[in-house]
């Protein structure tokens, strides 16, 4: 993935004029910029997910959530006691709202899963029952169902055929339509022997012929894994989610014991607590809000990544992204544009910029490399030179750029103009018996010291051969990258630029981009050593990669994002795959991970805080009659004990459904320090969790008091 650059004279030798360098990058998709946003939520999703919510009432499904399983048992108990006393309206009402509490919790999870199932249905359409052309040992072919392929089989695919399974191209080059996977209509190039050899089953060959070695078993293809993950079938609880579930279960046990001991205490005080009241008290005291929404928050976090065309192999990877403290970013394509561009024309003494611009433009018309095209554009836009074409110069002899000559040029109108790597142009000038201006080397060295690449422009005319000036090629840092890195710095995340450039060039680009550190002349072993060094210091590391040589580092990193255009080895090693193959998206993945953790923390804070108001509603209602002093706790002045208990239960159910949109969309993430973020969330969700129940329970109590026979 990274290459060592020894000197600037070799800078143009890797150009490939036969294919645009961006031909493998989706053209119609613009990477999302800025802060991590929220997902879409439509109220009609609640209705469409209602049948699934009822199916989830199965105790075998409910038992995975200890808090809601306790509420389910309580619902069954209160319903049984209500049947024993059919005339008890209070018992029936409490039972109904307890069932609604369980149903609303299931509905939150069903809505989150429903959005994933919609995406899975789209992916299923991409799965087709294909017939594979398997190569036999003698070179002949046999046609078998795609499901009959095994790892290591060689299959032939030609234009118009669907690739029968995941694998690597071992022979040939072809244009492939991957819109079924990426949603992007622009075809991509897949070829043998490089980092763009991986193909995905279900995609279509548009041109030429390729031979593919199958690398996955039937039913375990990339599309199959995507379907399982977005549907939630393969979703496992993350470590943080398990830890929070243990905490919620512990709190539930504590409150269960507390409620159990209230019965003898009430008998001693001369009052009687029915089973319905005790169950209502327990349900209101345990953290039902976060218990109901916890699973939906995790599913929605995975869904937000899928919406951005990123496939996370596990929820653990999403959580790790939220805790990342070091980002390793490749320079080319991530921090800078993929190709260097002409920035200025610098004349030697005795020559003008206009002369250099005119000669540079003419000598670059036969240069189809990205650098050559950028020279033509700069001459037109900055120096107002009319765009010219090869056909305009009758009788001109064009010299195309090649990796051997490292020069391009034109012979026309009695002039011979050359442009190219410094060593090649200087050698050409001397061969023609010309002279080199004294300041040419000085200008070239100054450009190199600034992190750029110098290309020389020379001409031979009636006065002889001479150097006219120097073209400054530079890596262009993407717009907004410096601001993004500043945001990451405020979040406490260290950014490290990885590049194969020499230290001088790397330092100049790092300073311009605003990254915290850089690793120059990096090899795969250097990357691995850097990751281990950061992890040894207790930090979580994220990185991107696409080549087989990146696989060890992707596997070692806590968050390894493999490009979909990369090799199978890279995709297997990483724990995320970016279907758009946009390395810059790593920054957004980190923001989505943080958004998931913030949403879970915010709603946990809200859930625990709103239990406080329920104490002030239910405890005075139970014991104020025998202990008048407790009436001082009735700060809401609720109308009656029955109304107080019922209001708390109703609010407990309604707050779940009210928070479903927030759980699915996620709390909007804004880059800030951890201390400031904690204060902000405590202020909004902690204080909000205290105030909202007081207002909500009081309003419900006022409405209940208007019902004849209750108030």
Image (cartoon, grey):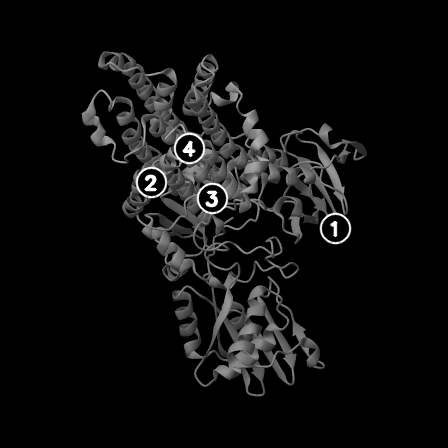
Tag 2–tag 4 contact (CB < 8 Å): no
Mark 2 highlights which residue?
Answer: 695
**Of pointers 1 and 3, the one earlier in the residue sequence:** 1
Calculate the distance from the C-alpha at mark 3 to the C-alpha at mark 2.
25 Å
Give the percent coordinates (x, y) of residue 441. 43, 73
Which label lies toward us, 4 or 1?
Answer: 4
Earlier-in-chain disc, 3 versus 2 = 3
**Mark 4: few/some/many CA within 10 Å (<14, 14-19, 20+):** few
Residue in the picture at 51% in, 83% down: 354
> Which of the marked residues, 4 or 1, is nearer the chain's N terminus?
1
**Which residue is the site of mark 4?**
707
Pointer 2 or 4: first along the chain: 2
Q: Earlier in the sequence, mark 4 or mark 3?
A: 3
Residue at (28% x, 29% y) in the render = 615
Q: Residue at x 60, y 81 (%)?
A: 386
Q: Which residue is mark 3?
A: 665
In the rendered picture of this protein, how many numbered marks are placed on residues? 4
Is the residue under label 1 in contact with that under label 4 (CB below 8 Å)? no
Hey, which residue is sitting farthest left in the picture? Answer: 629
Q: Which of the image's four quarters has the C terminus?
A: top left
Q: Mark 2: few, some, or many residues within 10 Å (few <14, many ≥20)?
A: few
Q: Nearer the viewer, mark 2 or mark 4?
A: 4
Is mark 2 in CB contact (under 8 Å) with mark 1? no
Q: In what element is the residue under mark 3?
A: helix
Q: Which mark is residue 207?
A: 1
Q: Secondary structure at mark 4?
A: loop
In the displayed structure, would residue 193 be above or below residue 29? above
Neighbor class of circle 1 (other Cα within 10 Å; few <14, some 14-19, many 20+) is some
How far apart are the two marked residues, 4 and 3, measured between alpha carbons? 37 Å
Q: Is residue 168 above or below residue 352?
A: above
Viewer can see residue 573: yes
């Amino acid at each position: 993935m990274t290459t060592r650059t020894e000197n600037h004279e070799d800078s143009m030798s890797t150009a490939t004029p036969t294919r645009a360098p961006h031909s493998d990058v989706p053209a119609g998709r613009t990477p999302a910029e800025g802060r991590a946003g929220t997902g879409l939520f439509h109220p009609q999703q609640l209705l469409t997910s209602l049948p699934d919510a009822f199916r989830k009432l199965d105790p075998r499904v409910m038992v995975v959530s200890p808090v809601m399983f306790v509420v389910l048992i309580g619902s069954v108990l209160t319903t049984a006691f209500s049947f024993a006393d059919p005339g008890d309206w209070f018992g029936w009402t409490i039972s109904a709202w307890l069932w609604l509490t369980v149903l609303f919790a299931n509905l939150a999870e069903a809505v989150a899963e429903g959005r994933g199932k919609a995406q899975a249905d789209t992916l299923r359409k991409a799965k087709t029952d294909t017939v594979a052309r398997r190569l036999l040992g003698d070179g002949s072919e046999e046609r078998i169902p795609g499901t009959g392929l095994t790892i290591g089989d060689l299959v032939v695919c030609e234009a118009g055929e669907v690739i029968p399974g995941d694998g690597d191209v071992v022979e040939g080059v072809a244009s492939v339509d991957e819109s079924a996977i990426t949603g992007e209509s622009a075809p991509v190039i897949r070829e043998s022997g490089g980092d763009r050899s991986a193909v995905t089953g279900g995609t279509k060959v548009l041109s030429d012929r390729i031979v593919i070695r199958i690398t996955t078993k039937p039913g375990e293809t990339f599309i199959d894994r995507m379907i399982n993950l977005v549907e939630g079938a393969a979703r496992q609880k993350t470590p943080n989610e398990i830890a929070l579930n243990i905490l919620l279960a512990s709190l539930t046990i504590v409150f269960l014991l507390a409620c159990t001991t209230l019965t003898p205490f009430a008998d001693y005080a001369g009052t009687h607590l029915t089973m319905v009241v005790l169950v209502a008290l327990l349900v209101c005291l345990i953290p039902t809000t976060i218990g109901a929404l916890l699973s939906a928050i995790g599913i929605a976090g995975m869904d937000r990544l899928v919406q951005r065309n990123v496939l996370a192999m596990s929820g653990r990877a999403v959580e790790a992204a939220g805790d990342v403290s070091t980002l390793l970013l490749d320079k080319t394509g991530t921090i800078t544009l993929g190709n260097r561009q002409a920035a200025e024309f610098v004349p030697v003494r005795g020559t003008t910029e206009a002369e250099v611009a005119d000669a540079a433009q003419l000598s670059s018309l036969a240069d189809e490399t990205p650098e050559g095209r950028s020279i033509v554009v700069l001459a037109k836009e900055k120096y107002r030179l009319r765009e010219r074409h090869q056909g305009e110069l009758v009788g001109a002899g064009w010299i195309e750029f090649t990796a051997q000559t490292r020069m391009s040029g034109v012979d026309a109108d009695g002039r011979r103009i050359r442009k190219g790597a410094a060593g090649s142009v200087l050698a050409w000038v001397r061969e023609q018996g010309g002279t080199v201006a004294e300041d040419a080397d000085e200008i070239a060295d100054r450009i190199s010291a600034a992190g750029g690449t110098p290309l020389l422009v020379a001409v031979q005319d009636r006065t002889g051969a001479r150097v006219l000036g120097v073209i400054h090629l530079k890596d262009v840092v993407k717009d907004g990258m410096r601001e993004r890195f500043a945001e990451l710095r405020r979040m406490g995340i260290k950014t490290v630029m990885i590049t194969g450039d020499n230290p001088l060039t790397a330092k100049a680009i790092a300073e311009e981009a605003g990254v915290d550190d850089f690793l120059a002349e990096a090899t795969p072993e250097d990357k691995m050593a850097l990751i281990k060094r950061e992890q040894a210091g207790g930090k979580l590391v994220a990185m991107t990669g696409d080549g087989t040589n990146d696989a060890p580092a992707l596997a070692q990193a806590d968050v390894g994002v493999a490009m979909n255009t990369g090799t199978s080895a890279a995709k297997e090693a990483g724990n995320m795959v970016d279907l758009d193959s946009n390395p810059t998206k790593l920054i957004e993945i980190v923001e989505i991970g943080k958004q998931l953790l913030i949403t879970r923390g915010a709603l946990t804070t809200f859930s625990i805080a709103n239990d406080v108001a329920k104490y002030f509603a239910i405890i005075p209602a139970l014991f104020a009659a025998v202990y008048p002093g407790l009436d001082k706790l009735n700060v809401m002045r609720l109308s009656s004990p029955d109304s107080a208990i019922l209001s708390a239960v109703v609010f407990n159910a309604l707050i779940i459904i009210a928070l479903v949109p927030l759980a699915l969309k996620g709390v909007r993430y804004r880059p800030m320090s951890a201390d400031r973020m904690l204060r902000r969330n405590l202020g909004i969700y902690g204080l909000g969790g205290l105030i909202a129940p007081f207002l909500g329970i009081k309003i419900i109590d006022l409405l209940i008091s208007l019902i004849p026979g209750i108030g």
